[in-house]
Image: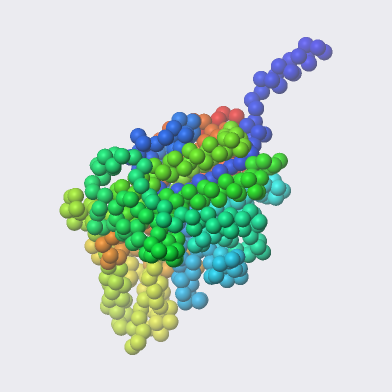
Amino acid sequence: MRPLILLLIVLALAAPVDARAEKPKLIVLISIDQFPQEYMQRFRAHFVEDGFGRFLSAGAVFTHAMLNHAATLTGPGHAVLSTGTYDHRNGIVGNAWYDRTAKRNMYCVEDAQTRLIGYPGTGRSPANLTTGTFGDELRIAGAFNSRVISVSGKDRAAILMGGKLANGAYWMEDSMFTTSTYYTAQLPEWVRAFNTSGRINTMFGQTWERTLPGEEYAYLGSDDQPFEDGGKGLGRTFPHTIVGDDASRITGSFYDALLTSPFGNELVFEFAKAAIRAEQLGQRNATDLLCIGLSSNDYVGHAFGPYSHEVMDLTLRTDRQLADFFAYLGETLGLDNCLIALSSDHGVAPVPEWIRARTNRGDAKRVDGATVKEAAGAALTKAFGPPPKGTAWIETMTGGNIYLNRDVLQTKKVAADAAARVVAAGIGELPAVAGAYATVDLRSQAQQSTLADLLARAYQPSRNGDVLYVYQPYQLEGSGGTGTTHGSPYAYDRHLPVMLLGPGVRKGVYAEKASPADIAPTLSILTGTELPPSYEGRVLYEALEEQTR
């Protein structure tokens, strides 16, 4: 018997260990709002060892990760990260969409059945999210012993990352972090303590200086560019003083300026640390999830553009803030006990005027959206005659959606599908329009066109319009001459970082195709948690240690 016992012991010791049996104590999902993959290359030489450099040296880095939908916006992007699905399944088709019944725009996390706590305004919740998240499954798998806390500068980022079963989602509103009655009847004591400390208001008068010597930014050109938006008292050049429009006192514009600076992210990280301490995240007999949304990168990118001194400096400051936060995790929990994922919700388009100032490129420009509306109406009038006096064919247009006036169609006895096809054909002839699709035909056209395929994943029948359209590359809707935006299906808006770090992750740089939608199912496999119910992303098996596969 002894040889048999010895053999069994040897076999047991030699058997591969299931890494999922040793679950991380804390999972951290970090989203940097408006952060294209290109920044990871362009600014890499200036990263510190323990910030982004930690992913590059010890993590799994996917260099070809693309959002596979056209709605490259904050709400949809964060829903992708948490659910592993695209808009057609998670329901978040935009930051807002037109509600035909209410005849008004519906904000993606609006919920009139709730109210904000300590702050005026309509309540917020994940009620419009139509599927579950990784965090939801984590709580279910742990018999609700796991805690899910989500924090951000923006409500939609915090709420949509946290999911429907989160213990709490918190975001900045002026001088406080708040939440809604969806989560709790009153703010927890630790949140009230953070708010009453007045920490946010202590940022009044802070000066944003460059992190590096000025010559390191010189390749970007002058710091003072006419197409930069220096509003909210920020000005167009360094240093930027964070006071808002009134340097003598705190006004609402101060809080806008604060978020349009690295100090907004600094506050989010401080609040995240407070959450770890107060909620004992990663310090109990359960695996917890902390979601962190860094919103200031988006505000700065919109105002100054991706090739500005400000975006470069904010990226370097984000790098150093990450290093500080990772050091805190190491001291509090031990980094070996933390599984960290980092990505973004969308990228950003270059400022058209920036391109034209350097190349005189004629197709980089701003487009007047009224021309699309006029062309749509003209096409319908040509096909079916004018609408009744005092009415219009188009009910509204928003976010690349055209909503036809159903009452007018009924009066004129015109089928909505036929009208939508006429509009798509009509506006599709405009030079600024790269593609226009009647949504009734989108599914079939998606089999033949990459653009239609991206739009189809962004389409939900009860929320989108009758026609979806897309402008040509480097063309933005609007008449102003400053700042930039996102929301297109092009690579500069879809190509994003996907990085993993921690137990069960095989370090390396991976060129395989990936997506932010892959993060949720990959975290599920790494933690032995059930996959999100409607997930579309794939598990990034190539970046997992053998025993985790």
User: Residue placed farthest to the bottom in the image?
Assistant: 389
Q: Is residue 303 left or right of residue 159?
A: left
Q: Is residue 141 left or right of residue 324?
A: right
User: Does residue 351 appear in this view?
Assistant: yes
**Residue 236 percent coordinates (x, y):** 29, 55
**Residue 526 percent coordinates (x, y):** 59, 38
At horizontal 53% and vertical 70% (from top left) the residue drawn is 121
At horizontal 42% and vertical 50% (from top left) the residue drawn is 262
- Residue 502 in which image quadrant: top right
The quadrant the N terminus occupies is: top right
Closest to the observer, 370 or 303: 303
Q: Considering only vertical position in the picture, is 164 above or below 498?
A: below
- Residue 409 in which image quadrant: bottom left
Closest to the observer, 478 or 179: 179
Closest to the observer, 207 or 290: 207
At horizontal 32% and vertical 80% (from top left) the residue drawn is 384
**Residue 74 percent coordinates (x, y):** 45, 56
User: Does residue 544 appear in this view?
Assistant: no
Q: In the rendered picture of this protein, how many numbered marks are placed on residues?
A: 0
Q: Is residue 285 left or right of residue 93?
A: right
